[in-house]
């Protein structure tokens, strides 16, 4: 049966059996977690109203643990393909540092605890949104779409888009057009970001049978799709200033950063062959991370300054 | 134990560290709920009929 870890020998415990604490920390995907915390914090600071700092820290902690738990469950389910991909072969389960069952238990327990903590101590709108995020990442993306369709990361990207909405809900107890816009920015950003990576990691995905767009539709179509999504993303990312979620600094920053994004996406579309083609895709991938980080950093900065001046 | 090989000692050391981490995480969770309760109740924590 494809997809389940139970039927593989992964997680086989080596001569020195017993995982250490660091292996469990790795299961939480700390780098992804840091971006989740950052975007959730932006949602919290940008939201109207206030939250007690202690409750704010607890909310961020719960969101971070919840996101980490989703990462652990993803590593449990995907251990078979992780073992055969260069990018993921060093993860704890493929390396035999801990068993798939340990990852499943760890991820499940943390999921339940993080959702309950957020729901009980902060509010249930945020708690339910965190539950949806974890469920979406595990059931919709990891179990269903990832191995089925090249649209996997388009739809699955929703899971990574929820954190600012959860942060916003932690403060206001509700969902608004502003938090939906932050969700949409990450949602539309995800495909060009991942497809740029997939362009130069194409063989890895092909070998393990994950139908990423370059594998199924070819690099030319992928480059076209990256360009089209970029054309939607850049104007969308300029909207926060138009609806009052962000100010003039953001308006200028999003325009400049958007122009660079479009230039790099255009290069990916035009330079299609050889090392230069790969280099263009790598450049876009690297810049896409900086782009999203800076957009949210400016929103965060603007609101933080406004609060300090008030 | 003199007969215990290095692998077994290492396994036991990791087991101890894991147990310690779980214990600390649970203690942190208790502290978290305690502090959050106090913060949410605010001044009302002392406001009850005797």
Image (cartoon, grey):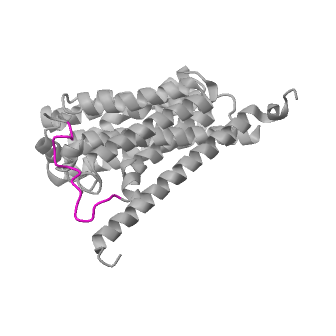
Residue at left 49%, top 58%? B20
Please tell me in which quadrant of the rendered image residue B3 appears.
bottom left
* Residue A237 position within the rendered picture, expressed as x and y whole percent measured from the top left: 46, 31
Q: Is residue B38 above or below residue A10?
A: above
Frontmost residue, A263 versus A204 = A204
In the image, the segment drawn in magenta is: A4-19
Residue A137 is drawn in which quadrant? top left
- Is A277 positioned to the left or the right of A184 in the image? left
**Could you tell me residue A72's position as x and y percent?**
35, 43
Kindly give the residue lying farthest to the bottom in the view shown: B2
Q: Residue at x 55, y 23 (%)?
A: A125
User: Image check: A247 left or right of A34?
Assistant: right
Q: On the rendered structure, is A41 left or right of A5? A: right
- Quadrant where the N terminus of chain A sits is top left
> Is residue A11 located in the magenta-colored stretch of the structure?
yes
Residue A289 in the image, given as x and y percentages of width and height: 40, 45
């Amino acid at each position: 049966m494809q997809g389940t870890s139970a039927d593989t020998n992964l997680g086989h415990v080596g001569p020195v059996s017993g995982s250490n604490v660091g292996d469990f920390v790795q299961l939480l995907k700390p780098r992804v977690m840091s971006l989740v915390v950052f975007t959730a914090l932006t949602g919290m600071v940008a939201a109207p109203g206030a939250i007690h700092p202690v409750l704010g820290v607890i909310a961020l902690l719960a969101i971070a643990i919840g996101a980490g738990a989703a990462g652990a469950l993803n590593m449990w389910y995907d251990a078979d393909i992780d073992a055969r991909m260069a990018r993921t072969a060093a993860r704890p389960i493929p390396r035999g540092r801990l068993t798939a069952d340990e990852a499943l238990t760890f991820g499940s327990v943390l999921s339940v605890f993080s959702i309950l903590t957020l729901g009980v101590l902060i509010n249930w709108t945020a708690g339910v949104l965190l539950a949806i995020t974890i469920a979406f990442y595990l059931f919709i993306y990891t179990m269903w779409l990832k191995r089925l369709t090249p649209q996997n990361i388009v739809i699955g990207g929703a899971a990574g888009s929820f954190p600012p909405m959860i942060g916003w809900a932690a403060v206001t107890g509700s969902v608004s057009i502003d938090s939906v816009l932050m969700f949409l920015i990450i949602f539309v950003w995800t495909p060009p970001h991942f497809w740029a990576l997939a362009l130069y990691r194409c063989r890895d995905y092909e070998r393990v049978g994950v139908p990423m767009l370059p594998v199924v539709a070819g690099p030319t179509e992928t480059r076209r799709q990256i360009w089209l999504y970029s054309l939607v993303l850049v104007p969308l990312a300029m909207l926060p200033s138009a609806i009052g979620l962000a100010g003039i600094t953001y308006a200028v920053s999003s325009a400049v950063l958007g122009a660079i994004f479009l230039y790099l996406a255009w290069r990916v579309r035009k330079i299609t062959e050889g090392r230069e083609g790969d280099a263009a895709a790598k450049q876009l991938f690297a810049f896409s991370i900086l782009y999203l980080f800076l957009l949210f950093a400016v929103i965060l900065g603007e609101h933080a300054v406004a609060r300090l001046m008030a | 134990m003199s007969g215990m090989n290095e692998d077994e000692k290492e396994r036991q050391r990791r087991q101890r560290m894991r147990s310690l981490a779980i214990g600390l995480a649970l203690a942190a969770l208790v502290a978290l709920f305690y502090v959050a309760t106090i913060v949410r109740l605010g001044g009302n924590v002392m406001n009850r009929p005797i």
